[in-house]
Image (tube, grey):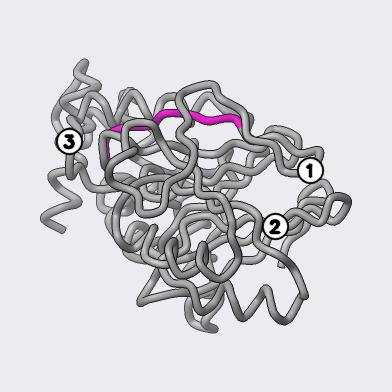
Amino acid sequence: MKIANTLIIFQLQALEDNYIYVIHDEASGETVAIDPSEAAPVLKLLTEKNWTLTKILNTHHHWDHVGGNLELKKATGCMIIGSYYDKDRIPGLDETVIEGDLIHIGKHTAKIIEIPGHTLGHIAFWFRDAKTLFCADTLFSLGCGRLFEGTPEQMWQSLHKLRSLPDDTMVYCAHEYTEANARFALTIEHENVTLLKRAHDVKALRATGQPTVPSLLGEEKAANPFLRADAPEIQKAVHQIGDTIGTFAKLRKMKDDF
């Protein structure tokens, strides 16, 4: 459990390497699940805390992010919110949102950021007051998502949007991929001091079964090669000097083949 400006965040493990997030506003009693891949972990927490689920927020339509939607909706009567562009692809969807829309959870407000690339309808939820970003499969710690539907240019622009957020933002991604991402990142920049420290810390955390998520956006900006495709040292490392999109595309292909 983490507390961000009175917003309580529970990080639940699901499937093989997924994270489901349940956030609770103490003042209003409102409880929200983000990307419930399955219902059981959420229902267990709700029972333990005697909370009522009011909303599900879905970042995109992939089954490992929406698999628990219908069971949770049936059990709790919650509202399901997702991207307008996924209106026919998210089960149980009640309300659609687009770039710039706001979702209120008690006194807290999440801004919708459209971040296509992994899928065309992918969105993120940014709680500015709580300094938290739920970005699912677009930005991972030390990595980024695969391009299942979008182009390298779309994904780079999406990551560039997220990179513009404040350094003290905590990044809550949806998978425990950091250790593998660190191994790949070190093949690109083996002398990056921030990356070396992060890789060391990640290895220690995983050795004791601890999560490496969330991560600090400021550190991601310094260590994540996918956020730095416009950096001369990254471009030089992949032989794409002066070509940001080409650099990003090359990084993504290299990671796919890693």
The image position of residue 224, as x and y in percent, is: 41, 43
Above/below status of 68 relative to 4: below
Q: Earlier in the sequence, mark 3 or mark 2?
A: 2
Viewer-side label of 3, 2: 2
Residue 247 image-quadrant placement: top left
Q: Residue at x 17, y 44 (%)?
A: 148
Residue behind mark 1: 106
The image position of residue 87, as x and y in percent, is: 34, 38
Q: Earlier in the sequence, mark 2 or mark 1?
A: 2
Above/below status of 116 relative to 106: above
Above/below status of 222 relative to 98: below
Camera-nearest residue between 211 and 30: 30
Amino acid on which disc 1 is placed: Gly
Residue behind mark 3: 238
Disc 2: CA contacts within 10 A as few (<14), some (14-19) or many (>=20)? many
Camera-nearest residue between 76 and 202: 76
Amino acid on which disc 2 is placed: Thr
